[in-house]
Amino acid sequence: MPYFIASTILFILGLIIIYWVHSQYHLDIVVTPAPPPAIGAALISICIPARNEENNIRRCVEAALAQDYPNIEVIVLDDRSTDATANILRGILLESDSLLSDSDDQVPAFKIISGSDLTEGWAGKPHALHQASAVARGEWLCFVDTDTFLAPQAISSCHAKALETKADLFTVMTDQILGSFWEKVVMPLVMTALSVGFSPRKVNDPSRRDAIANGQFILIKRTVYDAIGGHEIVKDQIVEDKAISEQVKWNGYRLIVADGTRVIRTRMYTSLETLWEGWTKNIYLGLRDNPAMLLLGAFGAMLALIAAFFLPVWPLLGMSWVLKGGGWMSLAVIFESILIWAYLILIRARVARGMNISGWYALTTPLGAGVFAAMMLTSAWKVISGKGVVWKGRTYHPE
């Protein structure tokens, strides 16, 4: 009887938790492809920081230059790259040197800036974007990561939606390109975890302090950017996108996060190694900067460990009990475990299809949960032990 009661309690809790975890992702504002505005629209400066991005830089920049928005400039800050990034950029510049800004025939629409050495007290990306924004002339600044690729109508569509929602900072969740096996196994679970930690509805509610932005694509009014102090105000933050969003919202400006999957795509990582480095860094910084997140992180790690290790053996424990003469209660335990599995796989298959991968990847949930739990625990240990993180070849120590 104690085994049956314990199984039934876990069954009920499991159903509740699975439903709750998967009911937090509400992106009510959706960016749909929109036509470009008329000539004379506000100038938008697309600022792209690039450090050792030879694999992505051409696709990213060419997509930015191909926008149908009638008044843009593209500024790339080469952040002391040691690979072929600079050479690729020079090649693109030669190919596009005939492009001129619609607003000023004397100013090229594509600029390459050689970044200065990292100044003490600054993190790499804020430093790069600070330099890019210093030469930007736009009424709006658009920060785009090099692993992010804009559809031709992306700027027109996002700018239109920003105006419609009266946003001062407009950011989107992008369509994630998942190529390798490990990306398809881990990334869907990570994105679900992010929706639990940062509910879009709460972020979009001006009465709440919840704030988050996706650094892959941020569109912000220049006046607001200057009013909050730009990237200098968050100069020591590696997760500068969240820090900027907090400065915007906490100073009374309008922050909007939307679904931008129809017009923007991103390939964050290409292997388990890069995925591990990137997400342990992000999780570490989230836990370090907000001690209360340690509790949520511990809860997330616990759920991931349960999914990774207990769920697969639950029906086996029931079967073992049947073989020992457990009767109807042991059969009930097997039935409960199968129902939990079926419900979880059904929901995870829906998440997988929403991320444009096969629903069969739902069956890898225990494996992905194990990797996610390991990332959570590794990041928590770095916080507790005071260790730093390495990102883009630079080491960042705890504050």
Image (tube, helix red, strand yellow):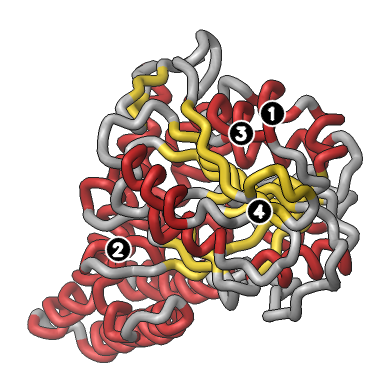
Q: Are marks 1 and 3 in contact (CB under 8 Å)?
A: yes
The quadrant where residue 225 appears = top right
Image point 27% across, 91% down: which residue?
328
Q: Which residue is mark 2?
A: 183
Q: Which residue is mark 3?
A: 132
Crowding around mark 1 (Cα neighbors within 10 Å: few <14, some 14 to 19, many 20+) is: few
Crowding around mark 2 (Cα neighbors within 10 Å: few <14, some 14 to 19, many 20+) is: many
Q: Which residue is mark 4?
A: 100
Mark 2–mark 4 Cα distance, whole angstroms, equals 39 Å
Secondary structure under tag 3 reads: helix
Secondary structure under tag 1 reads: helix
Secondary structure under tag 4 reads: strand
Q: Which amino acid, mark 1?
A: Ala
Q: Earlier in the sequence, mark 2 or mark 1?
A: 1
Mark 2–mark 3 Cα distance, whole angstroms, equals 31 Å
Residue 250 can be seen, yes or no: yes
Q: Residue furthest top?
A: 120
Q: Earlier in the sequence, mark 3 or mark 4?
A: 4
| Looking at the image, residue 358 lies above or below residue 46 | below
* Percent position of residue 253, x then y: 88, 44
Q: Which amino acid, mark 2?
A: Glu
* Percent position of residue 302, x then y: 39, 50
Disc assigned to residue 259 = none
| Looking at the image, residue 104 lies above or below residue 131 | below
Q: Earlier in the sequence, mark 2 or mark 4?
A: 4
Q: Which residue is mark 1?
A: 134
* Percent position of residue 366, x then y: 26, 66
| Looking at the image, residue 362 lies above or below residue 383 | below
| Looking at the image, residue 202 lies above or below residue 335 | above
Mark 1–mark 3 Cα distance, whole angstroms, equals 5 Å
Q: Which amino acid, mark 3?
A: Ala
Say which of marks 2 and 1 sits in front: 1
